[in-house]
Amino acid sequence: MSDNKRSQAITQGVQRSPNRAMLRAVGFGDHDFTKPIVGLANGYSTITPCNMGINQLAIRAEASLRAAGAMPQMFGTITISDGISMGTEGMKYSLVSREVIADSIETACNGQSMDAVLAIGGCDKNMPGAMIAIARMNIPSIFVYGGTIKPGHHNGKDLTVVSSFEAVGQFSAGKIDEAELIAIEQKACPGVGSCGGMFTANTMSSAIEAMGLSLPYSSTMAAEDEEKAISAEKSAYVLVEAIHKQILPKQILTRKAFENAIAVIMAVGGSTNAVLHLLAISRTIGVPLSIDDFEEIRGKVPVICDLKPSGKYVATDLHTAGGIPQVMKILLEHGLLHGDALTISGQTVAEVLADIPSTPRSDQDVIRQWDNPMYAQGHLAILKGNLATEGAVAKITGVKQPVITGPARVFESEEACLDAILAGKIQAGDVIVIRYEGPKGGPGMREMLAPTSAIIGAGLGDAVGLITDGRFSGGTYGMVVGHVAPEAYVGGTIALVQEGDSITIDAPKRSLQLNVSEPELATRRANWQAPAPRYTTGILGKYAKLVSSSSLGAVTDLDLF
């Protein structure tokens, strides 16, 4: 098969002379029209530290693609900085940006008849956005992670951006003074790279590595280190070889690959957002995957990594300890990984891991020994009950009170809830409900990092429950339940909760229950009316109209016709 099968549509034949004239203007010569054209989706921006270092990686990858015999065409993709937009109206655009990124990569690659794509991204929607596009197009593809930030340091402790969010709660609770607040702010983000704990960016980069669409060790490299640039260069050569062999995403993104990704996410203590994103990617590529599959795998896989937000270490520590390959080898040795799954290199997972030790090094404790895990089972649990008949997602490990029954404290927005927390109006035993923040109701399913961090900072992390039809940052921990579906805007039970109602969150039983009789709920449902949409035009209006339930991945192209 020709390496330039797709791009022949714009490079071959007399009738394509004008097309070639345009291509000559961007650097093509007489001998370049038979080479594969590779899209280089460059997520560079100065909007966020996560993406600031990406352009240099893109330039290195571009040179390597050319050296390997391909013709690279670079184009930009957008990003939203979750950390900067967090707690504001702007955060409604974050999950929306996943679809915009996917649409833009698909548009550029298909519109220009490209033969393959190398996508480089940093902030956390870059990864699933690129993967959705890759799944749609099914052309040879590889993802290059822009790299993680190195930790900040203050008073002998490692800092991440979450440290700054928690400091706000500590300051409001009178536990630290303004000088300490500012000191943490100044030191939390010392350079370029994505948020440093096992938050959503590093979770998704780890998942993509586990699925075989990025190179070994690349998911935990620091953005500033030379090895990250070398990995970007190597990725280009691997992609060109995949073009020769026609290794396609549908061969890699199989059911086994998704199960491998889920197992790794459980083992490293990854973000709740991984559930949403993997459901979206699987639906796009056509692999059956449901929210219940996460619960099934959770029961088999222990948490073997001690990583922030609830643990001690950051992604660079995991890298030093052996990275995702070491985690994967441990899982493979214990029958929790599919070794015969294909990777972009043409090797199987087992072949990639062949030289990795079966046990982690004894001189570190980032990756635990198999018989000494952080937790015996995975941390991402799927809760169901009358409050979430389609399911909800919770981090259940490390919570001192895994069962909470308390009065509902109901808020119609994230801002109203945060104001109440900072004003000291939330008490131990309360169950906070933040609603109309779902995919349609928000719209955009905002992350609730500001309220959850304020709860932690106020010392209520183990004493207060929080449920929402919105999302949580990968930096969130505590007794929190998100992705409640059906959401409030479409009439889910969460819309019927009244102030003071009894709610039970039971992590061991994976139950989320509103303790109100069915006749009373029927009366409330009959009297409920959907609120007017918050946006009727622009991208948020379009998103609210098209987006599916979070239990289906919050995709925007489901059952369009």
Image (spheres, rainbow, N blue to C red):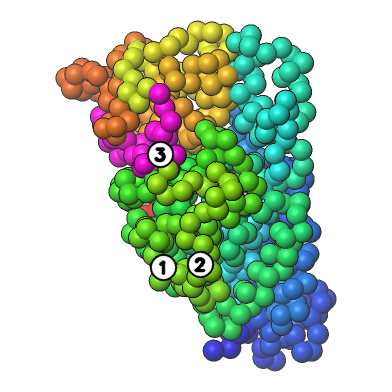
Sequence-earlier tag: 1 or 2:
1
- Image check: 365 left or right of 397? right
Image vertical order of residue 121 relative to residue 379, above or below? below
Q: Position of residue 212 (x, y in %)?
A: 51, 65
Q: State if disc 2 and disc 1 touch (CB < 8 Å).
A: yes
Kindly identify which numbered label has been placed on residue 375.
3
Rounded to the nearest angstrom, the CA distance separating label 2 from label 3 is 24 Å
Is residue 203 inside the magenta stretch?
no
Inspect the image, locate mark 2, and give the three-letter code of the amino acid beneath it. Leu
Name which residue lies at 62% across and 69% down: 117
Q: Is residue 35 above or below residue 271?
A: below
* Label at residue 339: 1
Asked if residue 249 shows in the view, the reply is no
| Residue shown at the point (29%, 15%) measured from the top left | 502
* Dot in front, 1 or 2: 2
Q: Which residue is mark 2?
A: 353
Q: If the image is split into quadrants, where does the N terminus sit?
A: bottom right
Residue 505 in which image quadrant: top left
Between marks 1 and 2, how big is the CA–CA gap?
A: 9 Å
Span colored in magenta: 373-400
User: Are the two marked residues, 2 and 3, in contact with CB atoms closer than 8 angstroms?
Assistant: no
Please tell me whether residue 262 is drawn above or below residue 135 in the rendered image.
above
The amino acid beneath tag 3 is Tyr
Left or right: 46 as drawn, with respect to 335: right
Looking at the image, is mark 3 or mark 1 nearer the viewer? 3
Q: Could you tell me how far apart the alpha carbons at marks 3 and 1 are, in whole angstroms?
A: 24 Å
Q: Dot 1 lies on which element?
A: loop
Position of residue 512 measured from the top left corner of the image (x, y, whole percent): 30, 28
What is the secondary structure assignment of the residue under circle 2? loop
The mark found on residue 50 in the picture is none
Q: What residue appears at the point 43 percent right and 11 percent down from the top-left corner?
A: 428
Residue 511, position in %: x, y? 28, 31
